[in-house]
Image (cartoon, rainbow, N blue to C red):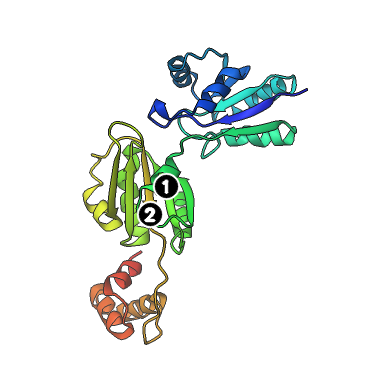
């Protein structure tokens, strides 16, 4: 009879957040698959748990995934953990669960802390519908395509970001989405936890100096359905009109102003979309 793969959520900062069930599960399985065995060893030592571990991360997931599944099929039970939070969410554990599905291995989840859920809960933005977008690519083309695809997204958007990449990301969010509500949440559950309600415009100007450190989650307001002005013009119509005026020799700022007066739409919105 084959064993079970347990997907176990671990703390994202405060060790007190590890649930009693998670402690029990980690103590009862035959072995633990960990993203970084050194990080997990500290967690296990804190709770007095001694279990053999196998490393499982992005660059060895194919080879180790097969090894883990073979051991489970031979009757051993395994818990997969990530360095922090829920495994399989923007995490290579996703591939192990898929492999278990292919091999008809039973899986069970032991819920735990999640940075994205925690961040949106304290963001002050709409929580009824949201989309998790993970980390933005460092590849300029992929990054642009990703952000372009979200320009009309009405749901609240959640991004993960590293501190050294935050300045460029804040500027990109303002550049692609204009001025919207934004909540920057950092170091969730840790000593220096901070929730910063702001806007994309303010953040791009004042929070992009590299001073914000730690693990960061960005919660961005979705696109609001704009009422069509009395004239019936859309923003696309206004931008097209402004570009026509520019082709006739008018300056960009003047053409945006003229298009604004004709269409009733905001000059800054027209201008920002013209220069992209």
Residue 147 location in percent, x, y? Answer: 44, 55
- In which quadrant will I find the C terminus? bottom left
Number of callouts = 2
Reply above or below: 228 against 79. below
Helix, strand or loop under label 1: strand
* Residue 159: numbered disc: 1
To which residue does mark 2 refer? 220
Residue extending farthest bottom? 231
Q: Percent from the top left, x then y, of residue 162?
A: 36, 38
Q: Residue at x 32, y 38 (%)?
A: 163
The N terminus, quarter of image: top right
Q: Residue 175 placed where, x, y %?
A: 33, 58
Measure the alpha-carbon separation of dots 1 and 2. Answer: 8 Å
Q: Is residue 138 visible?
A: no
Say if mark 1 contacts mark 2, CB within 8 Å. yes
Q: Which class describes the residues within 10 Å of circle 2: few (<14), some (14-19), or many (20+)?
A: many
**Farthest right residue in view:** 1
Q: Is residue 196 left or right of residue 219?
A: left
Between residues 210 and 16, which one lies in front from this camera angle? 16
Residue 233 visible from this viewpoint: yes
Counting other residues with Cα less than 10 Å from the Cα at mark 1, is it few (<14), some (14-19), or many (20 or more)?
some
Sequence-wise first label, 1 or 2: 1
Q: Is residue 234 left or right of residue 195?
A: right
| Front position in the image: 210 or 187 | 187
Residue at image position (28%, 56%) is 199
Which type of secondary structure does the marked residue at label 2 adopt?
strand
- Residue shown at 37% from the left, 56% from the top: 125
Location of residue 187 by image quarter: top left
Q: Nearer the viewer, residue 248 or 210?
A: 210
Residue 33 placement (x, y as % from top left): 57, 23
Q: Nearer the viewer, residue 142 or 30?
A: 30
């Amino acid at each position: 009879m084959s064993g079970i793969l347990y997907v176990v959520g671990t703390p994202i900062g405060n060790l007190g957040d590890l649930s009693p069930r998670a402690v029990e599960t980690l103590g009862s399985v035959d072995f633990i698959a960990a993203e970084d065995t050194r990080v997990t060893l500290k967690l296990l030592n804190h709770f007095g748990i001694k279990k053999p571990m196998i490393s499982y991360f992005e660059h060895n997931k194919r080879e180790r995934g097969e090894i883990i599944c073979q051991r489970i099929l031979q009757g051993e039970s395994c818990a997969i953990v990530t360095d922090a939070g829920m495994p399989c969410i923007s995490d290579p554990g996703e591939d192990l669960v898929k492999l278990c599905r292919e091999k008809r291995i039973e899986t069970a989840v032991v819920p735990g802390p999640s940075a994205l859920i925690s961040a949106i809960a304290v963001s002050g933005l709409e929580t009824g519908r949201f989309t998790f977008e993970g980390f933005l690519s460092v590849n300029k083309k992929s990054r642009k395509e990703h952000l372009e695809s979200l320009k009309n997204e009405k749901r609240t958007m959640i991004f993960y970001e590293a501190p050294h990449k935050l300045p460029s990301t804040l500027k990109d969010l303002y550049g692609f989405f204009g001025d919207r509500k934004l909540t920057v949440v950092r170091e969730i559950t840790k000593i220096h936890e901070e929730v910063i309600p702001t806007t994309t415009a303010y953040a791009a100007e004042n929070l992009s100096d590299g001073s914000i450190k730690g693990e960061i989650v960005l919660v961005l307001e979705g696109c609001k359905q704009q009422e069509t002005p009395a004239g019936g013009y859309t923003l696309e119509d206004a931008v097209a009109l402004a570009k026509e005026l520019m082709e006739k020799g008018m300056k960009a700022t003047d053409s945006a102003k003229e298009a604004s007066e004709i269409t009733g739409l905001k000059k800054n919105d027209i201008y920002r979309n013209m220069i992209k």
